[in-house]
Structure formats: structure tokens, C-alpha cells
Image: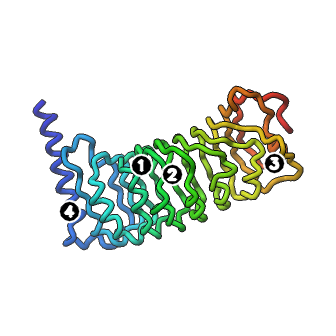
Amino acid sequence: MYLSTNYVFCSKLFNIIFIFFLSSTANTSFSKLKTLYLGGIFPKKSSVPAQLSLEAFPSLKRLYLTYNYHLNQTMFIQTLQVLSNLEELFLDQSPLSINFLQTIGALTSLRSISLSNRGFAGTLPTQGWCDLKNLKEMDLSGNELVGMLPSCLANLTSLRLLDISQNQFTGNVASSHLIKLILLQYLSISTNKFQVPDSFKSFANHSNLKVFLSDFNQLIPENDHVQTRVPKFQPRVLSLSNCRANEELIKPPSLLYYLYDLIYVDLSFDQFMGALPY
């Protein structure tokens, strides 16, 4: 018992000294620092939210703050604004409220942001994150986000990778603002409540999209569409498992006949009727 208590005390003391040393405005030795890893330094059992100031790192380009469960959100958001050169931000498994997304619009240099398993709940805000027009990679997977995707998503025209899997988003993918992100190379919308038309005609011009993952959504027939030519949409990986349409049997997507670059396909547990096109 003594050793356990002593260890916790020493661990807290170390974190306090360490963060004070890093964040001291008098310390100029980190003014040229480009990459900073601070994963898992603020454990759940801390009784006082950790005070982390980032003002000592004006040149920082990559910040890793994953697995930090007791970060002072107010102070962190305030000091984050000084990182005008920040290009990559990783905050997976570090709970902050969904309002955090409204505060990051000023980080215009951001190219990549990862916010998976954060406990975000509710609908996506329409301010802040939508202003990150230079963003190329975004991960919002494993949260509790609901509702339809906001129209401002279409502002993120530089996106190459988008992962919004394992949430509770709804709506028809064909009429969502995902179809305006024509530079996407990787898109994962698996394990949501989306409706995905089996023609995929809304993605016909997505020539850059090579990985499309949409497991555990609802694949719906689009009977009025007849595929007559090879689409620009030529994924190498296509995953549509467990996409049953309300127990209704539907035909396999005719698009498969026109996809000549595939190296991986998953249609398991879809219970199609008829033969696969080949």
C-alpha cells in the first residue's frame, strides 16, 4: 500500500515538474522544436486537470497528445491558438468536448488531425473545423456523432483521407456533401446508419478514391440507374459487408462488372439474390 501510494505521488510530482519545465515561457530552448510527443502523461487518476501551456513551442509542426484523460480543456484550447505553424495534431483517446471543433478554425496550417475515440457526442458543429481548407487527413472514428453530415464539410476540398466510421451518422450518401470531396483517396464510413445506393453513381467522378469502406450501413437499390460505361471511380479496395437492406434481397451492384482495378472486395453477409457480375 505504501509503495503504491508513493508511486502515485511521485508520478504526479514528476508530471507537474515536467510540464512546468516544458511550458515555462522563460525557457527558450524549445523555440525551434518541430515534433512533440506527450502521449499518456496525464492519467485518469489525477485529481487536478493538467495545466499544459504550448506557448514555448512557436515552431511546432507535429503534436501528439494521445491517451491523456485529464487535460485542462480551457487552457489547452487557449494556448493551442499560438501554434500557427502546426500541421499535424493527434488527440485520440484524450477526451475533450465536441465544442473543441469550433475552436480550431484558426489553425490554418493544419494538414492532418486525428480525433478518434474522443467521446464526441451529438451533431457536428458548422463552425471552426470547417475552415480548415488545407486539411488533407481527418479521423473522427469511434465517437458518438449523430445526424446528417453538415454542408460545410464541402469546404474541406483538400481532403485525401476521411474516416468517420463507428458513429451514428444518417442520411443518403448520394445526397450528402461527401460527393463534393473529389480528391479523396481513402474514405471509411463503416458502422453508421447511412443509406448507400448500390449504383454508386454519385461517386462516378471520384477517380482518386482507391479505398472505400462502407460495412454495416444500408445498401439500397437504385433500379432506375443502368450502368453503360466504365466510371472514373475505380477503387482498389471495396468493402460493403453486412449491408442488408431491411431484410430485402437485392441484386449485387452492377458496378462490379466495370471495376477493373480491384484487389480486395468484401460483400459478406449481404444476402444478395442472383449472380455476381463478372
Task: Indicate the position of residue 67 as horizontal and vertical percent values.
Answer: 35, 46
The span from disc 4 to disc 1 (Cα, nearest Å) is 24 Å
Q: Nearer the viewer, mark 2 or mark 4?
A: 2
Residue at 34%, 50% (x, y): give it: 39
SS label for mark 4? helix
**Where residue 92 is drawn, which disc sits there?**
1
**Eyeballing the image, is 57 above or below 71?**
below
At label 1, which amino acid type do we have? Asp
At label 4, which amino acid type do we have? Phe
User: Which of 215/87 is in front?
Assistant: 215
Q: Nearer the viewer, mark 1 or mark 3?
A: 1
SS label for mark 2? strand
Chain-order first, disc 3 or disc 2? 2
The span from disc 3 to disc 2 (Cα, nearest Å) is 29 Å
SS label for mark 3? loop
Badge 4 crowding class, 10 Å Cα cut-off, few under 14, some 14 to 19, many 20 or more, is few
Q: Nearer the viewer, mark 3 or mark 2?
A: 2
Relative side of 104 to 43, left or right: right
The span from disc 1 to disc 3 (Cα, nearest Å) is 36 Å
Q: Give the residue pinned by disc 2.
A: 139
Q: Give the residue pinned by disc 3.
A: 260
Chain-order first, disc 1 or disc 3? 1
Badge 2 crowding class, 10 Å Cα cut-off, few under 14, some 14 to 19, many 20 or more, is some
Chain-order first, disc 4 or disc 3? 4
